[in-house]
Amino acid sequence: MTKFQIPEGTKDLILDEALSKKQLIVNLEKLLDRWGYREVMTPTLEYFSTFLVGFDEVNEEDSYKFIDKNGRILTLRQDMTIPIARLVSTKFKDTNLPLRLRYCAQVFTVLESLAGNQNEETDLGVELVGEDTNCADLEILTIAMEALMVLDEKNFTLEIGNIDFFNEACIGMSEEDKEKLANLIDNKTLPELSEFVKKLDIDENKQKFFNQLPWLNGGLEILEEAKKYVVSDKQIQILDSIKELTDALIELGYKKYITIDLGKVPRLNYYTGIIFEGFVSGVGYGVLSGGRYDKLIAKFNRDLPSIGFSIKLDRLLTVVKPKLDYKERKIVHYPKDKMIKAITISKELRKDSIVSLNRKDSIEDIEIEVV
């Protein structure tokens, strides 16, 4: 290995990239502050057992793990929702509900195939804890829309689904078959999906439903189209609930940003209802993801419904450029005996410019260069 390299899946940010990221953080945090979300910070290191509690299944190879002096297994946090679930159960026992929390933190995942992703990313997000109504869902979806608009009118879409639309058709199925089915649908592996569905001990209506599910994505008309393939009354209720939310988003002026994907099956297994993902033109993968997770905090001994989302800030740096709040950049050149004068002049110039000082012994007085 060549000396002084950085680990695979990590990245140095310099100059305009660093400035772009800092401005994104500042602008998004201002937005969340104005919605009444207050910041929390959790340790970068957590006990690995915390994530074993939070996730139904943990792939240990995806985690960075360490051993502390007492022999307990530590891990770099993989996401922020599980640490916040732990935090809510321990630090907010006497706080009035609902809780509106926000965070900005590094998260770490060991990725076998990077495909443009990073092992270390900055997540910025919100959690609305203690509300299980459509009003709470609408609040979070609206904030997600407003957060994407912070990207200065970049073309984006917010893709909305509901994990229970899939789960409802899986009742009575083994967890192994359900997981295999979810992967095939999520990856839209259609021929293999068709063969797998034939082998399942399910009726013809369910077979038709699972084969059609990857195709149930697109415009708002998909909600009506999906009713042709439902296998339970509960699924009709789910579709009606999504329509209620999308109708409200349309009334708020977000129609052109909404798409539907009823075959959306997220990798994180703590979601229990509405799920959504934000995509931005010019970025090849989702930059925002979230959903409802009503059963997660109960695993930490406090039963509270919750919904939230996070934004992967580093994925946006290819399309977001820094905004400069100055007219021009200048250099004040000065000889050794004119430094006080140079600093005095530069203080005045900094009212509308970025000004650097440069000692230049070959000159006799102050020279100002515009660069």
Image (cartoon, rainbow, N blue to C red):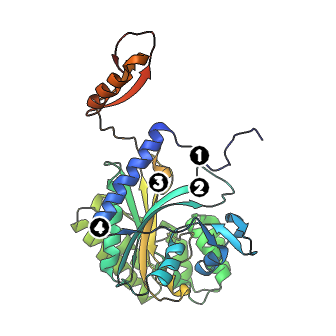
SS for dot 3:
helix
Look at label 2 and name its amino acid.
Glu
Residue to which mark 4 is pinned = 35
Does residue 38 show up?
A: yes
Tell me residue 244's x, y (percent). 29, 77
Mark sitting earlier along the chain (1/4): 1
Compute the Cα span from label 1 to label 2.
8 Å
Q: Residue at x 56, y 84 (%)?
A: 170
SS for dot 2:
strand
Look at label 4 and name its amino acid.
Trp
Mark sitting earlier along the chain (3/2): 2
Look at label 3 and name its amino acid.
Leu
Mark sitting earlier along the chain (3/1): 1
SS for dot 1:
loop
Quadrant in which the N terminus appears: top right
- Check the image and name the residue furthest to the front: 337
Compute the Cα span from label 3 to label 2.
11 Å
Tell me residue 366's x, y (percent). 34, 16
Quadrant in which residue 65 is drawn: bottom right
Disc marking residue 11:
1
Residue to which mark 3 is pinned = 313
Disc marking residue 120:
2
